[in-house]
Image (cartoon, rainbow, N blue to C red):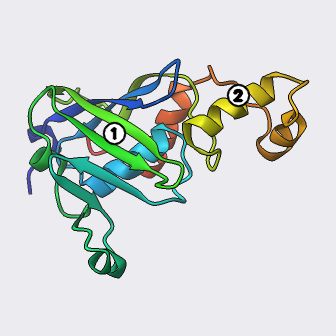
């Protein structure tokens, strides 16, 4: 088995599409993470709760957790537990998609920005940048999030009180790099 210092680190930019101003993250992960592991990393960096279906679209393939319904619907799902990231994304500049909550439709564009050597003593995966809080779960996708923001910031909005009771206050500009990295360290043992 190869040591981690013999592997590369992939630097990915994650952009949540259809939201303005943009919500994005920059993460560094080992090149040999599975897509299932990358899914868990994305859940943490976006502060999602991992309670909905998801899928990756890379090239012509759809990667997720296959089930018996996929064959009935003639969906050709590739098991995300098998391929390593370096096997499906290998060139700097490559882009692929991650969709979370197929009902609300949170589409993330991932770009491979760089392939770098690991820094001595660094913990991977790690988040090295980002802006803005991710939307709450079950808000209704980008249009629902836009309505939510209007409702929580306008006391005269007809849904103001309901939204505050349901989700509480949210500062859409708040993103804590330290908090995200603490969560990543809790979930992923350091081997770097």
Examine the rendering and report whether any part of residue 37 can be seen. yes
Query: From the viewer's perspective, is 122 left or right of 137?
Result: left
Task: Give residue 162's position: percent from left, percent from top.
Answer: 86, 42
Task: Give residue 175's position: percent from left, percent from top.
Answer: 57, 25
- Element type at marker 2? helix
Q: Residue at x 33, y 39 (%)?
A: 125
- Residue 38 position (above or below residue 144): below
Frontmost residue, 7 versus 168: 168
Query: From the viewer's perspective, is 166 left or right of 143?
Result: right
Task: Give residue 134's position: percent from left, percent from top.
Answer: 56, 34
Q: Residue at x 25, y 49 (%)?
A: 57
Q: Residue at x 26, y 69 (%)?
A: 75
Frontmost residue, 47 versus 182: 47
Q: Callout 1 environment at 10 Å: few (<14), some (14 to 19), or many (20+)?
A: many
Q: Callout 2 environment at 10 Å: few (<14), some (14 to 19), or many (20+)?
A: some
Q: Which mark identifies residue 125?
A: 1
Frontmost residue, 184 versus 27: 27
Q: Residue at x 52, y 18 (%)?
A: 21
Judging by the rendered image, the residue that carries numbered circle 2 is: 149
Query: From the viewer's perspective, is 95 left or right of 166?
Result: left
Query: From the viewer's perspective, is 161 left or right of 185?
Result: right
- Element type at marker 1? loop
Q: How many marks?
A: 2
């Amino acid at each position: 088995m190869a040591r981690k210092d013999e592997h590369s680190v992939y630097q990915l930019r994650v952009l949540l599409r259809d939201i303005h101003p943009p919500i994005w993250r920059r993460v560094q992960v080992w090149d040999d993470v599975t897509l299932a592991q990358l899914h868990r990393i994305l859940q943490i960096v976006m502060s999602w709760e991992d309670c909905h279906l998801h899928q990756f679209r890379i090239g012509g393939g759809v990667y997720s957790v296959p089930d018996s319904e996929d064959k009935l619907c003639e969906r050709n799902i590739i098991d995300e537990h098998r391929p390593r990231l370096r096997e499906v994304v290998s060139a700097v500049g490559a882009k692929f998609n991650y969709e979370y909550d197929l009902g609300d439709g949170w589409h993330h564009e991932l770009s491979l920005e760089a392939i770098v050597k690991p820094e001595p003593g660094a913990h991977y995966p790690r988040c090295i940048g980002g802006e803005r809080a991710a939307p709450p779960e079950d808000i209704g996708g980008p249009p629902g999030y836009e309505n939510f923001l209007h409702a929580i910031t306008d006391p005269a909005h007809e849904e103001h009180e309901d939204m505050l009771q349901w989700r509480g206050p949210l500062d859409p500009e708040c993103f804590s790099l330290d908090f995200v990295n603490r969560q990543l360290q809790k979930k992923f043992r350091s081997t770097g």
